[in-house]
Image: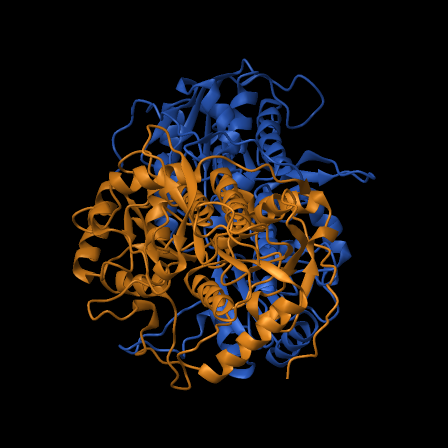
Chain colours: A blue, B orange
């Protein structure tokens, strides 16, 4: 190892070796744009020799399931920018030193066996909170083992709940899709309005935070537009106030569109969608989700025709409505990760920093991975109206720029033509894991 | 009344008067394109004096809620072609001579009071089965009352269940959206696949027919692509065969995407989503929908992580993914209705006729409204695979052309900018309805 050649503490001389990028956790519409950014930037740096992808995150890497990304066509790499779903596959596998110390130690040994066997010197993990924690552990192990490798986390989550970054790649696209859907459903329901009134409850993701639900407020161009009520996990449901609000909205507009984050809690702090008191024919509890619970609350108390929509996976996979801003930022995060690593940094997550300027602009910077793990960024209470039923102007100002711009998706037979990778495997060189 | 001027029985001399167009039933992404077609074609015919819209269908017309469509900007009329939801509003109101003969007779008197007061001589009703029945009744009443008026029904339903027409405007756009969603969710779920396998059940509309569910098969570009199983209301669920099929698919692909029409029946012919044996804490039955029922079946029997998506209203309102073919045909149906009426026809529905040619082409023709009412067009059994789990090539050949082409939707602030009508009211001239 050569000595630092300039004054920066983290910087070291050129580190020759191979790159490994992998994806983890729930995918987004732009999770592949970050991988494209990594690959395209890596190609510019002579220190990086081979560019490998790990299939299904850590879980696949432990099985030595690597592919050679330099074997992919340039067109496919560029196409990753508009292709949703994890092109490399993801996992929810955790290396958990607290709960499973023995397994975790074995996993780490195995990981470094593979890193060394393939001379991996650059490791990039695209993921949310848990994945950043994994990156941090891998970084620490590398230091401990005196194995020179640069580890940088790349943020990704439609939940937008990572701390220290202005927002998370993936969020803007999910909001663009959800808000579009809310505005379209509003045109439908408002046109069907009867004298009794009509209501539609749209359930979006967000187990802990209300960022996704709140984002649909961007569909509001006029004060009476949908969504009329946005319920978020951070603010427990007040059933009486909710019923009164629905009544008020229906009286004014003859229809009401409610958006609910799936993790909405009751006053006792329990998720309303996980109500265990409802039993099926065999006496098993029926878990039906937040929207269906609200439907029952409404149907029991108000005479309003109500329907529910549960967007589920559709909202994090809707590449056809990806935000061009989001795609560009996701790619930029991948590029920044490579530049930072080549520059000698390790143990950081790339973050987005909003410029304090009149027009929206974000740049990338780095945050110590120790600051990321186990911290959840909640929606600030002061970005919601006093009654807690709608995000306010502060939120709109924050979120609006994130959904700007559309991608041009190639179509074939009337449907989007997304890319799939050839996935040329890298030869396995270690004995199979026991 | 002048005598016929040529040999055609239906043809009469020019009928001077005003036009009334209205919408009825569940909206579609292209229901307004038909209204645009009516308005634009009507402008070409000197016999048609004023062009009125009835708000909320028959229900609003009974209240004399008419608007002057000639007051709308040309840009707004053109914009109707890409604006989902019913721009004029719809209703589910039925004039029912069988069940409510007194009310029906009163309604008819009132309708013709309004037609006469506004000199309505051309009446166009955009709707599904029930609405075509209403049009037929109004046509018969006009003949009976010797009130010269031409009544033409314009087909519209995402369900695609009207008889005698090759397909229904609205269907192609819903399929384009649903199939896109299935392909995107497949990218998501397949990338998340674990050793145990993952499954996603997507519920689409279709209470009686499986046209919408079947349409998602267009997402299949390769034999292993999603959807892997399509369950339609016409084929009762065989639980054992379904479980075996899911197991087989997961064994082969590690994931499985199931699409289910909301009206899927069990062997007893009951909707599985309307199972009354599940009770809430108060002992009331819980109705959770077909996808959630399938989820419970799977979770009870197989160890596969399963999630559900319920697209609901989103699928009939998704203007941002409307099929350009569908939009053009919906507009053409509106235009054809006006031409037929000016030509002296009444008591018909416009239908789409597929040309027997190598490349897809549809023209319009007319069908007697008597042939439409109370007939439902089911998905032919021979368009499904032998095991009943997938539409076959015959269906694909039928459906593929219907989703071709994309609309260019203006965007503002990152979201579609749909049009709203100014809705300049026509003065009420009759005493309010008692």
| Residue sitting at x 59%, y 50% | B14
Is residue A84 depicted above or below B140 in this figure? above
Left or right: B159 with respect to A380?
left
Query: Which residue is more in the foreground, B314 or B249?
Result: B314
| Residue sitting at x 21%, y 51% | B381
Query: Which residue is more in the foreground, B197 or B58?
Result: B58
Left or right: A428 with respect to B109?
left
For the C terminus of chain B, the image quarter is bottom right
| Residue sitting at x 59%, y 36% | B408
Residue A398 visible from this viewpoint = yes
Query: Which residue is more in the foreground, B81 or A242?
Result: B81
Residue A232 visible from this viewpoint = no
Left or right: A2 with respect to A283?
right
Q: Where does residue B214 sit, x and y in percent of width and height? A: 32, 49
Is residue B372 depicted above or below A388 in this figure? above
Q: Where does residue B198 sit, x and y in percent of width and height? A: 32, 50
Q: Residue furthest bottom?
A: B282
Q: Where does residue A139 sit, x and y in percent of width and height? A: 51, 36
Q: Residue furthest top?
A: A46
Q: Where does residue A176 sit, x and y in percent of width and height? A: 60, 46
Q: Quadrant of residue B192?
A: top left
Is residue B222 depicted above or below A132 in this figure? above
For the N terminus of chain B, the image quarter is bottom right
Is residue B114 depicted above or below B195 in this figure? below
Tally the marks.
Answer: 0
């Amino acid at each position: 190892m050569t000595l630092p050649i300039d004054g920066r503490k983290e910087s070291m001389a050129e580190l020759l070796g191979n790159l490994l990028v992998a994806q983890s956790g729930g995918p987004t519409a732009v999770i592949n744009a970050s991988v494209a950014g990594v690959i395209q930037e890596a190609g510019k740096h002579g220190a990086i020799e081979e560019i490998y992808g790990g299939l299904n995150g850590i879980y696949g890497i432990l099985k030595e399931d690597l592919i050679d990304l330099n074997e992919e066509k340039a067109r496919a790499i560029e196409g990753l920018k508009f292709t949703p779903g994890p092109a490399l596959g993801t996992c929810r596998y955790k290396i958990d030193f607290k709960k499973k110390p023995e397994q975790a130690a074995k996993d780490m040994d195995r990981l470094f066996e593979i890193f060394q066997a393939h001379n991996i010197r650059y490791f990039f993990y695209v993921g949310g909170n848990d994945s950043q924690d994994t990156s941090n552990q891998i970084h620490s192990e590398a230091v401990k083992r005196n194995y020179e490798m640069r580890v940088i986390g790349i943020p990704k989550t439609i939940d937008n709940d990572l701390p220290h970054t202005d927002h998370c790649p993936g969020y803007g696209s999910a909001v663009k899709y959800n808000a579009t859907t809310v505005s379209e459903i509003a045109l439908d329901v408002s046109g069907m309005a009867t004298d009794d009134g009509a209501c539609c409850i749209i359930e979006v993701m967000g187990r802990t935070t209300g960022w996704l639900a709140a984002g649909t407020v961007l569909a509001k161009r006029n004060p009476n537009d949908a969504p009329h009520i946005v319920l978020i996990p951070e603010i427990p449901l007040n059933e009486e106030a909710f019923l009164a609000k629905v009544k008020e909205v229906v009286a004014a507009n003859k229809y009401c569109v409610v958006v609910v984050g799936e993790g909405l809690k009751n006053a006792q702090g329990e998720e309303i969608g996980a109500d265990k008191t409802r039993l099926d024919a065999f006496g098993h509890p029926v878990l039906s989700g937040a929207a269906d619970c609200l439907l029952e609350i409404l149907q029991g108390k108000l005479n309003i025709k109500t329907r529910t929509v549960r967007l589920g996976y559709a909202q994090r996979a809707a590449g056809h409505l990806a935000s061009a801003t989001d795609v560009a930022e996701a790619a930029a995060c991948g590029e920044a990760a490579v530049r930072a690593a080549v520059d000698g940094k390790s143990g950081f997550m790339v973050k987005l920093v909003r410029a304090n300027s009149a027009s929206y602009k974000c740049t990338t910077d780095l945050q110590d991975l120790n600051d990321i793990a186990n911290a959840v960024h909640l929606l600030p209470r002061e970005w919601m109206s006093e009654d807690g039923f709608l995000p306010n102007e502060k939120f709109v100002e924050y979120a609006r720029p994130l959904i700007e711009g559309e991608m041009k998706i190639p179509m074939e037979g009337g449907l989007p033509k997304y890319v799939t990778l050839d996935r040329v495997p890298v030869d396995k060189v270690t004995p199979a894991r026991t």
